[in-house]
Amino acid sequence: MRHSWKRLIATLGFMVAGHFGSAIADSRTDLAHLHPGQRSAPPIGWMQFCREVPGECGTPQASAKPMTVSEARWRELVEVNLHFNRSIIAMTDQVQYGVMEHWTYAKTGKGDCEDYVLEKRRELVRRGWPASTLLITVVLDKEGNGHAVLTVVTDRGEFVLDNQTDQILPWSKSELTFIKRQSPTDPNAWIELGRTLGRPDIVTAGTR
């Protein structure tokens, strides 16, 4: 007999099936999706990344339609999140590169939060996910530190892939403070998500 979706997720060592079930309910409410505000300046790390890897920054997207989540697609999210959370060794940019902020792929097998995000984004795009549904997002973590996560826009709401946890949570249940993220129609345009804290740029320099 074919495993149910919940059993499939459980075999991968996650507690996400229940969270996904609650997200289905959230998809009928105002909490399913983040509500963007005004334009914001891109993070300095993103601009540096684009100068060094211009082909990865792309051009404005033709479509910003949410990704339809099937059992197979959800499993991809789970696998990709777990793989990079477990395979990349946490290390600050200051220790590895001698600077506070340096966005790049984890070529050395080490990196901090934005390196996890870039790797997850690249792998999901490779698997057929539209880049317009995979948005790099600047947040404050539960301890109030600058942090970066990948927000995945789906027909069941928006989910967070975070190197601080293997659980894939709806944004509204993540306990993160959302600052700004890429526009789904242009990866080089960034949009405020509520709190700017009077700071022109938030450094996402922690290893966590």
Image (cartoon, helix red, strand yellow):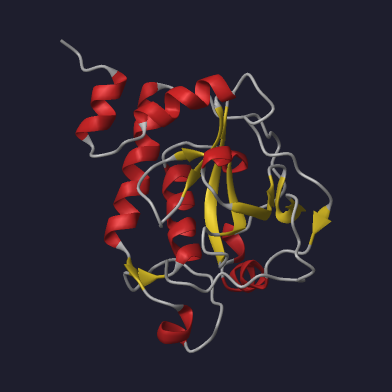
Where's residue 90, x and y in %? Answer: 35, 70
Q: Is 205 in front, or is 56?
A: 205
Residue pushed farthest right?
A: 38
Q: Is 39 in front, or is 196?
A: 196
Q: Quadrant of the C terminus?
A: bottom left
Q: Quadrant of the N terminus?
A: top left
Does 109 appear above or below 32?
below
Asked if one can make out residue 69 in the rendered structure from this viewpoint, the answer is no
Does 108 appear above or below 7?
below
Q: Is residue 103 left or right of residue 78?
A: right
Does 68 appear above or below 55?
above
Does 112 appear above or below 185?
below
Residue sitting at x 63%, y 18%: 28
Q: Is residue 179 left or right of residue 27?
A: right
Residue sitting at x 53%, y 70%: 103
Asked if one can make out residue 71 in the rendered structure from this viewpoint, the answer is yes
